[in-house]
Amino acid sequence: MTNTNRHRRQEAMPLPPIKVIEEEMRRLNALANLSVELFPRVSHFLAREMERATVVTDDMDMHGVVRMSSRVSYRDDRTGETREVMLVYPHEADIKLDRISVLTPVGAALIGLTVGQSIEFQTPGHQIRTLTVLDVSR
């Protein structure tokens, strides 16, 4: 691998713009703050995502945007694997039912994305992972 290729691999993908409704913004900020001692890394990630999100009114049309209780189909861009999950609050999470918590790296990465957007993030194992949203429904 050439030095130029190494440098390209280390460059971070720019973060895509995201949208979150006011009600979910309040709840997710509170969740991130309350969870910081138990889950510091993902709490900081979720808080950072909320800081950079565009906040929209609760009655705005959010068709195609990943929200809480959305059913999301996404692709892991490294493996090509696709999954369909429902994004939920931690107390509703159940991996057997494909209900993933927003307080997981994947959940925090997906919130606010729209169909076709990709996001790159670091896993707890320090690997870089990129997900692309394929479909969103409520």
Image (spheres, rainbow, N blue to C red):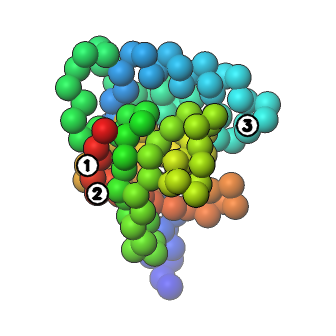
For marks 3 and 2, the one nearer the N-term is 3
Spatial CA span between label 3 and label 1: 29 Å
Spatial CA span between label 3 and label 2: 29 Å
Q: Is residue 13 visible?
A: no
Q: Secondary structure at mark 2?
A: strand
Residue at image location 39% in from the left, 74% down from the top: 80
Q: Which mark is residue 115?
A: 1
Disc 3 to disc 1: CB gap under 8 Å:
no
Q: How crowded is the residue under tag 1: few (<14 C-alpha within 10 Å), some, or many (20+)?
A: some
Residue at image location 73% in from the left, 38% down from the top: 39
Residue situated furthest front in the rendering = 97
Q: Secondary structure at mark 1?
A: loop
- Mark 3 vs mark 1: give the one in front: 1
The residue closer to the viewer here, 127 or 138, is 138
For marks 1 and 2, the one nearer the N-term is 1
Total marks in image = 3
Left or right placement of residue 94 versus residue 133 in this view: right
Q: Secondary structure at mark 3?
A: helix
Quadrant location of residue 113?
Answer: top left
Q: Is residue 109 above or below residue 36?
A: below
> Measured from the top left, where is residue 86 in percent x and y?
44, 46
> Measured from the top left, where is residue 71 in percent x and y?
37, 46
Left or right placement of residue 16 versus residue 79 in this view: left
Disc 3 to disc 2: CB gap under 8 Å:
no
Left or right placement of residue 96 versus residue 58 in this view: right
User: Which residue is identified by label 3?
Assistant: 40
Q: Is residue 105 above or below residue 74?
A: above
Disc 1 to disc 2: CB gap under 8 Å:
yes
Q: Which mark is residue 134?
A: 2
Q: How crowded is the residue under tag 2: few (<14 C-alpha within 10 Å), some, or many (20+)?
A: some
What amino acid is at disc 3? Answer: Pro
